[in-house]
Image (cartoon, rainbow, N blue to C red):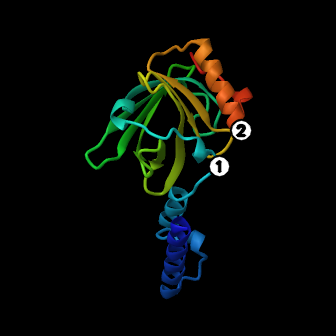
Amino acid sequence: MLKFNCITILLFFAINCNNFQNESKPIYENKKIFPLLFGVITYYSDSQFSKYAVDSIDLSRYAGSWYEIERIPNSFQGEIANVRATYSLRSDGNITVYNEGTFSNGSSRSNTGVAIPPSLPKAILKVSFFYPVRFSDYYIIGLDTTNYSHAMIGGSVPNILWILSRESTLSDTIINSYKDSAKAMGYNTSSLKSYKN
């Protein structure tokens, strides 16, 4: 209800600001208001998959580098391979996310974003590489809670999923266990793929 109320108030404010300025354009063409409004909406979005997030997480232990073992192909990563994500805790309580990888032609790519933990201790992050214009849901739905040595991350839709490890390899037993778990949740695990050059 709080999420709905916040979005409703912001929509009302944005529409009235648009009218007050006598803008003839629709709100989605307003370059000042719409990006901020879209950011708020994506931040407060939720999904059926959020209920599978781990109930408790220690972000100081989760911080550090993770290697991507498998992922469901997605448009924002394309064919990038050998992906490594590094999470660093910030003084404001948020997390800096640094992703890096390589392509088959030898070129590399990296980007930096921010992750906001709105539901601690539940393992839900709101991640943005276009802060504060757009956020994506990042649910830690599987985790080695003893050693924090491997994890599984799901998105808000069935086609967003990663299996991660502190090492560049992970045993088939653990991978298959994660796949079985994610499939039961409703993720399209048959599309999982390893990207290595």
Q: CA distance from mark 2 to mark 1?
A: 10 Å
How crowded pointer 2 is (Cα within 10 Å; few <14, some 14-19, many 20+) is rated as few
Kind of residue at disc 2 = Gly
Q: Please state if 89 lies on the left or on the right of 159 as rendered.
A: left
Residue 171 location (% of width, % of height): 57, 12
Nearest the eye: 16 or 119: 119
Query: At which x and y percent is residue 6?
Result: 50, 70
75 is higher (above) or lower (below) than 189: below
Q: Residue furthest left?
A: 91
Circle on res. 143:
none
Q: Which quadrant of the view contains residue 89?
A: top left
First reached walking from the N terminus: tag 2 or tag 1? 1
Q: Position of residue 162 (x, y in %)?
A: 58, 30
Q: Residue at x 33, y 34 (%)?
A: 60
- Quadrant showing the C terminus: top right
Q: Which mark is residue 48?
A: 1
Of 187 and 181, nearer the camera is 181
Q: Which one is in front, 186 or 137?
A: 186
**Is 175 displayed left or right of 132 in the figure?**
right
- Write the residue at 59% across / 69% down: 28
Q: Which residue is mark 2?
A: 186
Q: Residue at x 54, y 57 (%)?
A: 42
Query: Compared to 163, does 26 lie above or below?
Result: below
Q: Secondary structure at mark 2?
A: loop
For the residue marked with disc 1, what is the amino acid?
A: Gln
Q: Is 83 rendered above or below residue 13?
A: above
Q: Residue at position x 57%, y 57% from top?
A: 45
* Disc 2 to disc 1: CB gap under 8 Å: yes
Q: Of helix, strand and loop, which one carries label 1? A: helix
Density class for disc 1 (Cα within 10 Å; few <14, some 14-19, many ≥20) is few
